[in-house]
Image: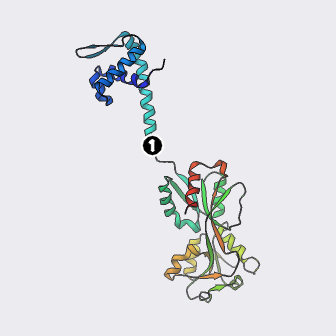
Amino acid sequence: MRINPEHLVTFSVVAELGSVSRAGQALNLSQPAVSGQLRALQDQFGQPLYVRHGRGVALTEAGERLLPHAQAIARNLAEVAGQISGARQRPAAALRVGLSFALSEHSSALVRRARTARLHLRVVARPAGTLIEEVRAGRLGAALIVTSPQRAVDDLDLHRVGEDQLRLVTPPGHPLSGLGYVAPHALRGETLLWSARGSGVRRQAERLLDGVGVSAAQGLELGSLWGVLAGVRGGDGVAIMPAGFVARDVQLGAVASVGLEAPAVTVAHTLVTAPAALLSAEVRALVALLRTS
């Protein structure tokens, strides 16, 4: 025999309030609907569960035996409804995402865009090498870094979502600033400003200068790309940096940007994630979101 749990809930409310009409108000049901459910339940049991009197309803002995079970079902259904409602209202857990320093100025736009896809991001900025290790260790769900287009990382997936070009960035009025393009060997003797070891931009810049007699030892290590840009603004040296990172300063005249005559000037904006089989639904949604940009 299959019993409708809604009928048991109605029965428990009628028993609690002692009135069909008051139970209907509490359940947002008409009085005939409440009476119909009671009759259907009573018919299934094959014996009276209640009797009507002038002031309302009283339970029979069979009804008294049924009442604790009906109340338990009503409580369980109410708890389930509360959990469902709470799950709908509860904000999604934050997805921790790392950004390399070269892309950190895009963090606000990334978080806003993710919200349109119902993704709640918590962003941290680190050098690319550190971010890769944090993704591998599971401390980050994903990391957006700048790296060479050909780079591969063991045990992780790389999703290319954009690209940029490396440029030589100089103070305004520097002897090289008026040239459209320069060859890498033109940087011999210049004070080069570098971001921290492990930076994707630095790795690509070192590769670009490899074989022309220019090394990281020829210059100053200033930590982040923001520190490097501040150093160029202050006239402390020149740097190889992504065009997008310095575009605003170039437009304002705070620095000058010069093209580099070299084959390895393209850098990829790459989202680093765990292998596809291990991705959470949130990371999959982030990959799809960035690929549509």
What residue appears at the point 72 percent right and 80 percent down from the top-left corner? 214
Q: Would residue 199 be seen by someone viewing this image from the given angle?
A: no
Q: Quadrant of residue 74?
A: top left
Image position of 220 with respect to 268: above or below: below
What residue appears at the point 30 percent right and 25 percent down from the top-left corner? 23
Side (left or right) of 210 relative to 94: right
At label 1, the amino acid type is Arg
Q: Seen from this angle, which residue lies furthest left?
A: 54
Instruction: Report crowding for label 1: few under 14, some 14 to 19, many 20 or more residues within 10 A (C-alpha).
Output: few
Side (left or right) of 121 relative to 11: right
Q: Would residue 32 be seen by someone viewing this image from the given angle?
A: yes
Q: Quadrant of the C terminus?
A: bottom right
- Residue 204 at what x, y percent from top left? 68, 71
What residue appears at the point 55 percent right and 52 percent down from the top-left corner? 95
Q: Tally the numbered discs.
A: 1
- Residue 109 at what x, y percent from top left? 49, 63
Q: Which residue is mark 1?
A: 88
What residue appears at the point 54 percent right and 58 percent down from the top-left corner? 123
Image position of 180 with respect to 143: above or below: below
- Residue 281 at what x, y percent from top left? 57, 48
Q: Seen from this angle, which residue lies furthest right?
A: 211
- Residue 104 at what x, y percent from top left? 55, 65
Q: Name the element at disc 1.
A: helix
Q: Quadrant of residue 290?
A: bottom right
Viewer-side residue, 132 vs 21: 21
Instruction: Look at the image and name its color scheme.
Output: rainbow
Side (left or right) of 142 relative to 152: left
